[in-house]
């Protein structure tokens, strides 16, 4: 399987962006965004789909930490 | 060392004075037994210039000075004009002395700047990033070694063609940087390079297909696993292939850095994801200016 070229990459990224916009609006309610999910999985290689799902989780986690702060784990507080 | 130079110059000015005053002493009728001014003042070159030059006049002149300052009615027209000549000579000598001090200071300052630059280069060499040679194939199938790129400024990025978003982003950024630098005719052209960390999948054909989407001068480099690993190790690039999924696809985790290499093949600087293209352009321009100063040819 050869790598996607520039236009394929762009198509994949815009499908991903659409999906993420929908998920943001519907508060990650994936059932409401079935259509975008389908398109996203069509346009992007399977590996990228998994990668972008993980990436989204990471970005949300990073956001949460930046906005809400974090609690250090139990081990750390023993210092 | 500065003092010694001042001494040398002052000895020269002394000899100028001696020759000038030899004529003047013939005119003078009054030759007091003046104390010989100690030229110990010579050693204190940081004293005011006027004082220094005044103190080292030879005895006959010293007498002349007294005659000049005392405003004696016995002052003849001859000694008046000779005093004016003396003033001009004194002024000339002072300016010469001052000019030589400034010249010396400037020269020493330049030497120091040069030394600092050399020291920094030595430090960079010690870090020894990118010191080795690499033997790779470019995307046209031609064999390329590191020496081929000497004499050019190089922007180097390690990545792989199956990269979902990061590598295309970074290569786009690199393309933009090179494009902006190309617009400036006073700067030498920069050679962008893309070396794969995934030699298993990224063969010459894959690289050719990939680099087409970026800057026309971008050269993609690949090779055997051994050659690629060697090149990556030279630049201390971390690369680790992830697990394969059901399609046999995998993502290679790797250092996301753009390296700047100067025409001597020396690694100068690096840019991570946080630097945008404008910042990188500024930095490269700065490096280029400094480089030209150090090795003028």
Image (cartoon, rainbow, N blue to C red):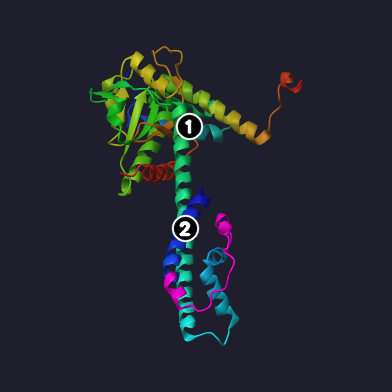
User: Which residue position holds label 2?
Assistant: B11
Mark 1 and mark 2 on one chain: yes
The quadrant holding residue B122 is top left
Secondary structure under badge 2? Answer: helix
Side of B162 relative to B58 (left or right): left
Task: Name which residue lies at 63% across and 34% down.
Answer: A66
Indicate yes or no whether the magenta region holds residue B43. yes
Indicate yes or no whether the magenta region holds residue A78. no
Crowdedness of circle 2 by 10 Å Cα count: few (<14), some, many (20+)?
Answer: some
Of B158 and B42, the residue lying toward us: B42
Looking at the image, residue B208 lies above or below residue B4: above
User: Which residue position holds label 1?
Assistant: B123
| Image coords of residue B206 (percent x, y) | 29, 22
The quadrant holding residue B214 is top left
Subunit of mark 1? B
Q: Which residues are magenta?
A: B22-48
Of B14 and B30, the residue lying toward us: B30
Furthest residue toward bottom? B73
| Image coords of residue A56 (percent x, y) | 53, 28
Mark 1 vs 2, N-terminal side = 2
Task: Name which residue lies at 50% across and 54% down.
Answer: B7
Residue depth check, mark 1 versus mark 2: number of the one nearer the observer:
2
Q: CA distance from mark 1 to mark 2?
A: 42 Å
Looking at the image, residue B248 lies above or below residue B270: above
| Image coords of residue A35 (percent x, y) | 45, 28
């Amino acid at each position: 399987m050869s790598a996607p070229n520039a236009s394929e990459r762009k198509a994949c990224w815009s499908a991903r962006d659409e999906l993420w916009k929908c998920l943001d609006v519907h508060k990650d309610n994936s059932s409401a965004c079935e259509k975008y999910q389908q398109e996203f999985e069509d346009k992007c290689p399977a590996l990228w789909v998994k990668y972008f799902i993980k990436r989204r989780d990471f970005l949300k986690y990073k956001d949460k930490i930046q906005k809400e702060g974090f609690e250090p784990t139990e081990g750390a507080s023993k210092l | 060392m500065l003092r010694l130079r001042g001494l040398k110059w002052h000895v020269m000015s002394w000899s100028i004075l001696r020759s000038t005053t030899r004529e003047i002493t013939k005119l003078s009728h009054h030759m007091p037994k003046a104390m010989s001014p100690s030229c110990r003042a010579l050693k204190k070159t940081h004293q005011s210039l006027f004082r220094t030059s005044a103190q080292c006049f030879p005895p006959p002149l010293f007498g002349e000075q007294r005659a000049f300052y005392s405003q004696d009615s016995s002052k003849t027209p001859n000694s008046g004009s000779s005093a004016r000549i003396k003033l001009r000579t004194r002024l000339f000598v002072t300016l010469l002395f001052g000019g030589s001090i400034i010249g010396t200071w400037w020269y020493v300052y330049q030497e120091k700047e040069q030394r600092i630059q050399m020291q920094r280069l030595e430090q960079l060499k010690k870090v020894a990033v990118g010191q080795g040679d690499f033997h790779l194939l470019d995307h046209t199938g031609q064999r390329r070694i590191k020496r081929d790129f000497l004499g050019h400024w190089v922007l180097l990025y390690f990545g792989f063609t199956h990269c979902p978003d990061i590598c295309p982003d970074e290569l786009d950024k690199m393309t933009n940087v090179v494009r902006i630098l190309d617009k400036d005719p006073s700067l030498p052209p920069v050679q962008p390079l893309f070396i794969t960390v995934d030699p298993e999948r990224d063969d010459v054909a894959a690289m050719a297909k990939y680099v087409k989407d970026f800057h026309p001068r971008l050269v993609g480099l690949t090779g055997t696993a051994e050659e690629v690993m060697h090149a990556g190790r030279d630049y201390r690039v971390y690369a680790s292939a992830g697990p394969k999924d059901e399609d046999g696809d995998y993502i290679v985790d790797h250092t996301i850095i753009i390296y700047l290499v100067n025409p001597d093949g020396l690694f100068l600087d690096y840019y991570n994801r946080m630097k945008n293209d404008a910042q990188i352009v500024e930095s490269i321009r700065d490096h280029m200016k400094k480089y030209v100063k150090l090795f003028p040819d």
